[in-house]
């Protein structure tokens, strides 16, 4: 069944009834209840990104779908919060299959780029150019069952991490974990650590972008059942040594910004923090922790499974689509070429770190 009328609104123009309908559609989906797909995330992005929009799709006079996005010059569109959002796509009533190009036209878009498209997004999957892996932790059966999985698949990792946690307590001071810390100073500390980590590893500093800093600040104050900003902090001797900020629904904790104080690196406080986060999330009834795409050694040690996510762009014929291709595809193909060759990828990582050291004052 295809959609009829499409109405485009700013996120803040959505009425509470429309937001409730959005939540109900999402609740009826077979996909995990990822908080990035809830209206609260789109509303927060709309407060810091003036070009944020929501297309409301109607069928038989009733709202039957929602597509959040951002519209740039020449109709170049992007998934809402692209660059930081870890789950993207449309929220549609089961059985609703809009014509993608007609939908883009209704939104005045020549293209719609995505980099973390949800696997069940049949509307946009035909436009995917690359598949990536997102790493997940399944705690549906509780933390004790998860520890048993770790003992089977990563026995040395678990034993070593727990030993470092005990050593941290002996040598630095009492170890304390807060799953949902509300102290704004702790959030500022996390962002400072994360910025330093980006610079140290030669990556672009996301927190140097004002809109991202403002977005995280707004989400830290968001307390909705399916989208709650959650700051978790590991303390030792009364001072923070590792922290993480993410978004939580009733069933999914979307892991987002983890960092630690390098002064305490020998204790692996980031790994200790993640174990305590898993334990606390399981106690809260959360069944899945989504660590997002991007390979990392700590993810390999902690994960219990993997999910596919997709990158690409839906387009419709015209100059805007051609400009999108010229601006994105050569770089994407170059990244893919490097990523598929481990030795070249390792060299690229070392080069980035070297360049970062040269940039330091």
Image: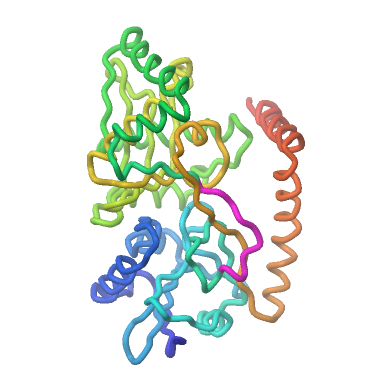
- Above or below for 305 versus 1: above
- On the image, which quarter does residue 128 sit in? bottom right
Q: Quadrant of the C terminus?
A: top right
Q: Relative to 101, is 168 above or below?
A: above
Q: Does 291 lie within the magenta span?
A: no
Residue 217 appearing in the image:
no
Residue 171 picture location, percent across and down: 35, 7
User: Which is more toward the observer, 343 or 159?
Assistant: 159
- Residue 43 placement: quadrant: bottom left
User: For the point 28% across and 38% down, which residue is it?
Assistant: 142
State how the image is colored. Answer: rainbow
Residue at image position (64%, 58%) is 130
* x and y percentages locating residue 118 in the rendered image: 49, 61
In this image, 25 relative to 327: left or right? left
Which of 224/167 is in front?
167
Q: Position of residue 252 (x, y in %)?
A: 34, 50
**Residue 268 screen position, x and y as percent:** 45, 21
Give the number of marks.
0
Q: Residue at x 71, y 62 (%)?
A: 327
The residue segment tinted magenta is 125-134
Q: Is residue 62 visible?
A: yes
Which residue is pictured at 30% across the width and 53% down the height?
249
Up/down of 222 relative to 327, above or below? above
Horizontal side of 267 relative to 219 (left or right) equals right
343 lies left or right of 138: right
Placement of the N terminus among the 4 image quadrants: bottom left
Q: Residue furthest top?
A: 171
Question: In the image, is residue 318 above or below residue 271?
Answer: below
Please tell me whether residue 131 belongs to the stretch shown in magenta.
Answer: yes
Question: Which secondary structure type mostly characterizes the magenta part of the structure?
Answer: strand
């Amino acid at each position: 069944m295809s959609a009829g009328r499409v109405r485009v609104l700013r996120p803040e123009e959505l009425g509470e009834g429309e937001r409730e309908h959005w939540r109900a559609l999402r609740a009826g989906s077979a996909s995990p209840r990822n908080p990035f797909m809830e209206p609260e995330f789109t509303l927060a992005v709309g407060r810091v990104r003036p070009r944020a929009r929501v297309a409301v799709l109607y069928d038989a006079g009733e709202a039957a779908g929602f597509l959040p996005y951002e519209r740039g010059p020449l109709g170049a569109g992007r998934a809402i919060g692209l660059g930081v959002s870890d789950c993207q796509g449309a929220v549609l009533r089961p059985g609703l299959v809009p014509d993608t190009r007609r939908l883009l036209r209704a939104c005045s878009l020549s293209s719609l780029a995505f980099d973390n498209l949800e696997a069940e997004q049949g509307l946009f999957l035909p436009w995917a150019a690359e598949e990536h892996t997102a790493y997940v932790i399944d705690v549906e059966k509780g933390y004790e069952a998860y520890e048993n999985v770790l003992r089977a698949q990563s026995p040395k990792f678990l034993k070593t991490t727990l030993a470092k946690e005990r050593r941290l307590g002996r040598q630095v001071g009492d170890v304390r974990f807060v799953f949902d810390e509300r102290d704004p100073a702790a959030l500022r500390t996390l962002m400072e650590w994360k910025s330093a980590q980006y610079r140290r590893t030669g990556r672009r500093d996301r927190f140097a972008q004002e809109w991202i800093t403002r977005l995280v600040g707004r989400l830290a104050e968001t307390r909705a059942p399916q989208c709650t900003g959650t700051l978790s902090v590991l303390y030792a001797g009364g001072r923070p040594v590792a922290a993480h900020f993410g978004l939580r629904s009733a069933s999914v904790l979307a892991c987002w910004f983890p960092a630690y104080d390098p002064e305490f690196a020998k204790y692996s406080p980031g790994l200790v923090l993640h174990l305590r986060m898993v334990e606390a999330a399981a106690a809260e009834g959360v069944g899945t922790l989504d660590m997002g795409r991007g390979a990392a050694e700590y993810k390999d040690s902690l994960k219990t499974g993997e999910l596919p996510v997709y990158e690409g762009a839906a387009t419709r014929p015209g100059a805007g689509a051609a400009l999108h291709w010229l601006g994105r595809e050569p770089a994407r193909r170059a990244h893919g070429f490097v990523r598929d060759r481990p030795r070249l990828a390792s060299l690229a990582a070392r080069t980035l770190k070297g360049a970062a050291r040269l940039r330091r004052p």
